[in-house]
Amino acid sequence: MQDDGAVNTPRRVPLGMSRILPSALRSRLAVLFAAAVAVVIAAGVGLLAFATDRQFDAAVDTGLVTRTSALHQAIQRGDVRVVREDPIAELVAPDGTVVETSPAAAVLEARGGRASSTSSFLPATVLAEVRRSGEVSDSIELPRQGRVRFTASPVSVPEAGSVLVVGTRMRELDEAETRLVLLFLAGAPVLVASLGLAGWLLAGAALRPVADLTRRAARISAAELDQRLPQPPGADEVAVLARTLNGMLDRLEAAVRREREFVDDAAHELRTPIAVLRGELELALRLGRDLPADAAESLEAALSEADRLEHLAQDLLLLASAERGVSVRAPVDLTALAEREAPRLAAAHPVQVHVSGLPAVVDGDERALGRLLANLVANAESAGASRVQVRTSLVDGSGDVDGSAGTGGSARPWVRLVVADDGRGFPPELMATATERFTRGDAARTRSSSGAGLGLAIVAAVVTDHGGRLELGHDAELGGAAVSVELPLAR
């Protein structure tokens, strides 16, 4: 809720701390960490599946070798019927006919054919390789039976060229391996999310010193360049960053100090020659009554420019004084000050000045605050205003209207001074730079009484020196510009 005629759609000029938004770096680091974890998990699951498969095969191969050795010994003794007692075994003659087979081996299909007890479940090429090269251990995928791990070795019974095949179904082991992999894959999203959250928290903890430096750096305004960032001990990246930023602040402070000293010295040095020049021009005009009209007009133009230079020098000195913060503070009633200044301002500028509001006392420099009012009225005149309203009210620390002369909330009250006019208002392109020195985006709006574009710069410097806030905006009641100044209420 706002008081009558309060500033609508204001744009706060960045005089104090800016709001610091969290950087996306923390999220990017968390995402990269989660992605790396996902890759590691995927690689780990693949490696686990490979290692498990190799381990299962090695264990089965050990059992196959033991069974093959026992069957070899029995066959060499002429007992070929022992093959029938093995879980999966068959004795294949040189022509490919199965001489003896176990019941389980008899139902295995080879090469996709039908089950038969007269043909081996191994392809003929594998049997030929065994006869040619000796023992072969491998796996074969059979339709509807799954993977079968086998060991095939040559035997001389019942005749040379025979092959003993011993096998084990791998379906149960393969299914167990698949369940193990699926179990890991099912838990992977939870693990990735958990570790991603942990990475986000760790990244936040790691970046917190950087965020602290950012917030502290944002609080350092042009009037507080003597402040420095805390330097953590050590030589890590944060400490190096703090030292680098402090070094930059050292250089910036030195540059600004040199600039202010130059402007201050130049303004001081210009006052005397400008005063002499002005006096000489006035004397020439008084004594030169018989001068030609052109000469008299030139002297008057020169005197006008001398006046403008004198105002410029005074403005520069006032600006330097406000930026240095050397004002003398005393209780000042802004409403009473505006009422005292209104007649003089109305006489100096062709505008009507109206003052309204309750008593509002601040700790400030009355001379500087009076100049603030004068600059704002002159600024309104430059925008073609015919009416100017000066309104005072109390607001709480958050900027909401208090509406009483007492303390309406828990926050410390502030005084709001609004200077509104019925002129052209601020051009949108000027809002961001209106309080900078020599800003003249719209000559009619930005030229102060001195015409140098220092009016609002002085206003901003005075507000900053008094620890206040400044807003530029549009006034809904008068239709022109509205400048809102908020200062802490005197204790």
Image: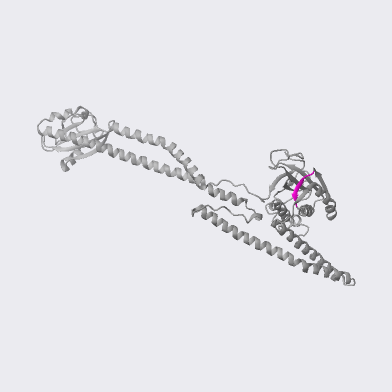
- Residue 293 higher or lower than 129, as above or below: below
Where in the figure is residue 74, as x and y percent of width and height?
12, 32
Q: Going by the image, does 234 lie left or right of 20?
A: left
Residue 308 seen by the camera:
yes
Q: Residue at x 80, y 67 (%)?
A: 275
Q: Residue at x 32, y 40 (%)?
A: 50
Where in the figure is residue 326, as x and y percent of width and height?
71, 56
Quadrant of residue 133 within the rendered picture: top left
Q: Going by the image, does 404 lie left or right of 29?
A: right
Q: Which residues are magenta?
A: 359-364
Check residue 374 for magenta coloring: no
- Residue 427 higher or lower than 72, as above or below: below
Quadrant of residue 248 within the rendered picture: bottom right
Where in the figure is residue 399, as x and y percent of width and height?
70, 43
Q: Going by the image, does 119 lie left or right of 413?
A: left
Residue 122 seen by the camera:
no
Where in the figure is residue 369, as x and y percent of width and height?
76, 52
Q: Is 318 or 169 nearer to us in this picture?
A: 318
Label the magenta part by its dominant secondary structure. strand
